[in-house]
């Protein structure tokens, strides 16, 4: 694992987004924030991200639609769902679309960092398997 992942944070709650961006920035992650699904897709098309932190309830389009498009355009990009409206059905749907993890708000800094690390380590293992 050469560097930390570049993260696209898709979160419509400003205070939550600022807090997450601060915590992840202090941990050394490069984080861009989009407060809508459309803005997230716009940023995603312009820049390469290793990981998307995706809220499901957005003001414009459903977070699941964004996850679907992200996974179709760049299957190597990992997705962690972050939601305050967790249900078993949405967790199953997100995982079927290719999400690597699913965190219910509120979660701790440590839980988020652990989820990101786990996804990043797993991705690095897959990448190194392809290089063999």
Image: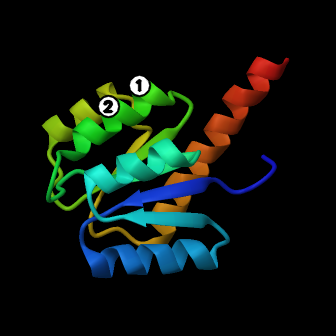
What secondary structure is found at the residue carrying circle 2? helix
Question: On the image, numbered disc 1 is attached to which residue?
Answer: 72
Kindly identify the residue that appears in the image at 75 percent across and 19 percent down: 130
Assess whether mark 1 and mark 2 are in contact (beta carbons under 8 angstroms). Answer: yes
Residue sitting at 50 percent across and 40 percent down? 78
Q: Which mark is residue 2?
A: none
Can you say which quadrant of the picture contains the C terminus? top right
Image quadrant in which you'd find residue 20: bottom left
Residue occupying the point 18% across, 57% down: 58
Q: Which residue is mark 2?
A: 68
CA distance separating discs 2 and 1: 6 Å
Q: Locate residue 68, reporting x and y percent.
A: 32, 31
Total tally of numbered discs in the picture: 2
Percent across and percent down for residue 83 are: 24, 57
Asked if residue 23 lies left or right of residue 90, the reply is right
In terms of image quadrants, where is residue 48? top right
Q: Residue at x 15, y 53 (%)?
A: 60
In this orientation, does residue 91 appear?
yes
């Amino acid at each position: 694992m050469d560097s930390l992942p570049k993260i696209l944070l898709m979160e419509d709650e400003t205070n939550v987004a600022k807090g997450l961006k601060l915590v992840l920035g202090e941990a050394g992650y490069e984080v861009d924030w989009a407060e809508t699904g459309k803005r997230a897709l716009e940023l995603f098309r312009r820049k390469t991200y290793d990981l998307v932190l995706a809220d499901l309830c957005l003001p414009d389009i459903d977070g699941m639609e964004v996850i679907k498009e992200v996974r179709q355009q760049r299957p190597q990009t990992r997705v962690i769902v972050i939601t305050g409206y967790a249900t078993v059905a949405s967790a199953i749907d997100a995982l079927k679309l290719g999400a690597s993890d699913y965190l219910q708000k509120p979660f701790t800094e440590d839980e988020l960092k652990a989820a990101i690390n786990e996804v990043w380590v797993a991705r690095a293992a897959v990448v190194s398997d392809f290089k063999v």
